[in-house]
Image (cartoon, grey):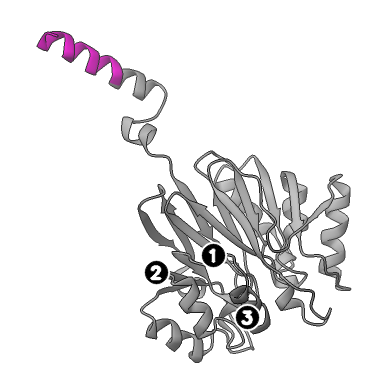
Amino acid sequence: MTHKLIKVITSLTLSISLLFGFSSAQAATKEMKVHFINVGQGDAVYIKTAAGEDILIDAGNKDGSDVVAYLKKQKVKDIEVMIATHPDADHLGGLDEVLHAFKVKSVYAPKVSHTTIAYKEFLTAVKREGLKIKTAKSDVSVPLKGVTAKFVAPIKTYAKSDLNNWSAVLHMKYGKKSFLFTGDAEAKSEADMLKSKNSLKADVLKVGHHGAKTSTGSNFLKAVKPTYAVISVGKNGYGHPTSTIIKRLKAYNIKTYRTDKSGHVIFTTNGSKLSVKTVK
């Protein structure tokens, strides 16, 4: 092949790439992004898989307009999977507004009810959209393209007053990189997860219950072995995150981010490498 012909082919390839708006590097490397959205004292996680599917885990407190705005900024058109980790208002409070703003294909939640207005509004919104809630419990897999996503909790049934331990805990793996989203799971649920045969190992841990001392036990951290931890927290009267948990994470050399200090925390992975950035 002549040098002139090689130049023509290279030029043509570049032109096609520019025409369709991608580079050869982008075409070869598909990335998954995990956004820990700063919603104050609450939880909201948005995941965009490399295959282009959208997952939302919780949506902050009573007003979901901030989460809706964030998703629209990310050019979300519809949501393949919505997960309500448990009935507390600071987790599912904004999901009704998300259901109103976007077409949602499937909804998962643990089989535990609550009497709060926020929970009733969530149920009403699900029904209005003609959806049925799929049970989130240990060993239930979430069908997604190119990633392995499976609930590792709740394993047992707990008292209805013990809502935190009912939390749906999702383990998600893309290539060699993995994430563990724990909701508000506390010591009982962590102990049950440790007894199970499920792998809890994850590169990124969403710290349970906003950094409360009743979650993120030493044995649990030893099993997860995270490189990074994210505490989703805002101004509160509970003392979250507690100094006990901050010191424990530091003792295990885990790089920890807090949404109240860093803003949105966004991880990007191509399945082999993992990077993180924060946006205030």
Residue 191 numbered mark, or none: 3
Instruction: Tell me whether circle 1 and circle 3 mark residues in contact (CB < 8 Å).
Output: no
Whole-angstrom CA distance, mark 1 to mark 3, is: 13 Å
Q: Which of 235 and 239 is in front in this view?
A: 239
Residue 227 numbered mark, or none: 2
Label 1 sits on a secondary structure element that is: loop
The residue carrying pointer 1 sits among few (fewer than 14), some (14 to 19) or many (20 or more) residues within 10 Å by Cα, namely few
Frontmost of labels 3 and 2 is: 3
Q: Mark 1 points at which residue?
A: 199
Point out residue 123 in the picture as x, y percentages from the top left corner: 86, 59
Residue sitting at x 58%, y 55%: 46
Frontmost of labels 2 and 1 is: 1
Residue type marked 2? Thr
Residue sitting at x 67%, y 45%: 79
The residue carrying pointer 3 sits among few (fewer than 14), some (14 to 19) or many (20 or more) residues within 10 Å by Cα, namely few
Residue sitting at x 48%, y 58%: 178
Q: In this view, does 237 lie to the left or right of 21?
A: right
Instruction: Tell me whether circle 2 and circle 1 mark residues in contact (CB < 8 Å).
Output: no
Image: 177 above or below 152? above
Residue 8 among those drawn in magenta: yes
Q: Is residue 187 left or right of residue 62?
A: left
Q: In the rendered structure, which segment of residues is drawn in magenta?
A: 1-13
Image: 86 above or below 248? above
Image: 117 above or below 14? below
Label 2 sits on a secondary structure element that is: loop
